[in-house]
Amino acid sequence: MKQTGLENLTSMLIKNSLRVSPQVRFTSPPNESVKAPLRLKYLVIAIALLSLQGINAFDAVAQEKSPAVKMNNSPNNNSNTSVQTYTLPRLVDAANPNAKDLIQLFQDAAQNDPIYNAAKYAYTAGKESYWQAFSVLLPQITGSYSTQSSDIRYDPNLNNIANRKDYVFSNSGWTLSLTQPLFNWSYYEKYKQGDLLTGVAEANFAQAQQDLIVRVSQAYFDALTAQDTLDLYLNKKGLINEQLQQAKRNFEVGTATIVDTNEAQSRYDLVIAQEIAAQSDLLVKKSALEQIIGQPVDTILPLSKQAKVESLRQERTVKYLDDSKGKLATNDIIEALHLSTGNTIEDWVRQTEEVNYNVIVGRLNSEIAKSNYRSVQGTRLPIVSLQASTGYNNSLGNATSSLPNTYYANQIGLQVSVPIFTGGLISSNARQTAALYDQSIATLDLLKKSNAVATKQAYLGFTNGIAQIKAYEAAEKSALTSLQSNRTGYNVGVRINIDVLNAQDQLITTQSSLYKARYDAIMNGIKLKSLSAVLTDEDVIAVNKLLH
């Protein structure tokens, strides 16, 4: 029965193909002009037979594995009717008056971002290290007061108590003591470490400010990318659906085979899956943005399609750490830098290796490790302290006398202590701190190299990204022209359905790459400034001008 149906369908296809076969002209000799149309007809018939046999074989395998699933190869059947898609509210909407821009989101994040708030509190706590270390160099004054009352009574039943009397007496007094370190090398090193730890707190907080701008910008443009991707897939679905309906109409009137319909249907089913994945990705990116700013986000502004990303180039000038901004507590470590004011990649790499905040933290940590080593070595030296005290004592009798006794006492002197033998503790601590210092030097070198690589990537990503944007803009125009040409060719019969579908894919892929190239170029510029410790609120304002 199936064989009879296949033969009937084959016969129908032969008739239709003979009836609608295009007139193709050849420049071959006259005796071959008749053979060429027949070869073309036979080729069309063979393709149709192979496609029908492949579909029947797939149908048989599917029915064998899952009898409950029924497949219909009719072009009028929509295979994705069971797939339910939903429409998300637009996250990116330039027409919404309540849409937030990058500056508004950055201000919200500065108030609500837990990472930034943790860094802010750590900075507040870190500033106290200086005063804690400074306190050990100041005089240590302590005061004490005591009072005591005694009541002594003897047992009359005991022997030899004739000369013993009961006594009631009291004592009271106060003492004020002062200790002033005159020479203690460990205390001096602790004071320097407190200064260095304050510098670490300042540099960490400055880096947290840079990171906040980067994280908010990255989350913002990730959300824009996700919305653009979803819009492109929705546009692609519309284009493919239009092509699918046209293929069905052509099949019904006999001007095309079922192959065109099946190809369009497979592309349509695929874009449905891509749309669902894009919706999920948009929800994830939106949640990531909301996590940073600490409140729900309804809509945000898109990047202007006419945005000139290269306009950010004029903001990319090398800056310096000077006395008015970015000055840390340890100016002896961060000296005045005489960097080239050019914008070459070498200038940016040197800027990063010298003033990147993570590098500064590494340099300060190495100084702290060196100070720890010197502090341990200083424990071998004498400790000299000035000690003074004054006091008052009032005694109203005692166990031997009932006469009062009142006096003042003042003392002053020097105390010198020298460690003689500590069981090898000092030597062990010295070896340990020396190894930790070497570790800090290695860590600092790693930070410089890793930041240099990141700076090169950001620099090349920005400069090459500008060129990529221009190339993708030209490619978008070419892809659109190619799609229009393939559609026209399909309508007149010189192009097949797969050519139109491929042209649609090429256009969507090019547009997706163009949008992403714009966002990546902006982010690479922001990261470049962050690595060089020159990213400020002014850069956020400059990027925000590209939105609309």
Image (tube, rainbow, N blue to C red):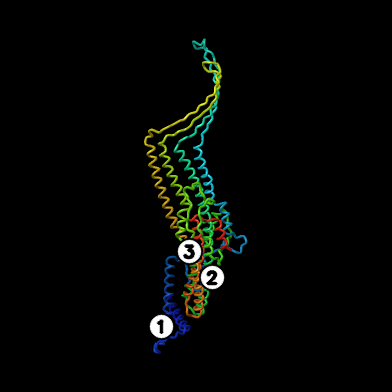
**Mark nearer the N terminus (2 vs 3):** 2
* Image location (x, y in percent) of residue 147: 55, 24
**Structural distance between the alpha carbons of marks 2 and 3:** 36 Å
Number of the front mark, 3 or 1: 3
Label 1 neighbour load within 10 Å: few <14, some 14-19, many 20+: few
**Mark nearer the N terminus (1 vs 2):** 1
* Image location (x, y in percent) of residue 400: 51, 15
**Structural distance between the alpha carbons of marks 3 and 1:** 55 Å
Please tell me whether residue 43 is drawn above or below residue 417 in the rendered image.
below
The reply to whether dot 2 and dot 3 touch (C-beta < 8 Å) is: no
Label 2 neighbour load within 10 Å: few <14, some 14-19, many 20+: some
Number of the front mark, 1 or 2: 2
Q: Secondary structure at mark 3?
A: helix
Residue sitting at the far bottom: 30
Under mark 2, the amino acid is Gly
* Residue tagged 2: 238
Please tell me whether residue 444 is drawn above or below residue 501 in the rendered image.
above
The reply to whether dot 1 and dot 2 touch (C-beta < 8 Å) is: no
* Residue tagged 3: 463
Tell me where residue 540 sits by quadrant.
bottom right
For residue 273, say whether it is visible: no
Under mark 3, the amino acid is Thr
* Image location (x, y in percent) of residue 326: 52, 51
Which quarter of the figure is the N terminus placed in? bottom left
Under mark 1, the amino acid is Arg
Q: Secondary structure at mark 2?
A: helix
The reply to whether dot 3 and dot 1 touch (C-beta < 8 Å) is: no
* Residue tagged 1: 39
For residue 363, say whether it is visible: yes
Seen at 52% across and 44% down, the residue is: 127
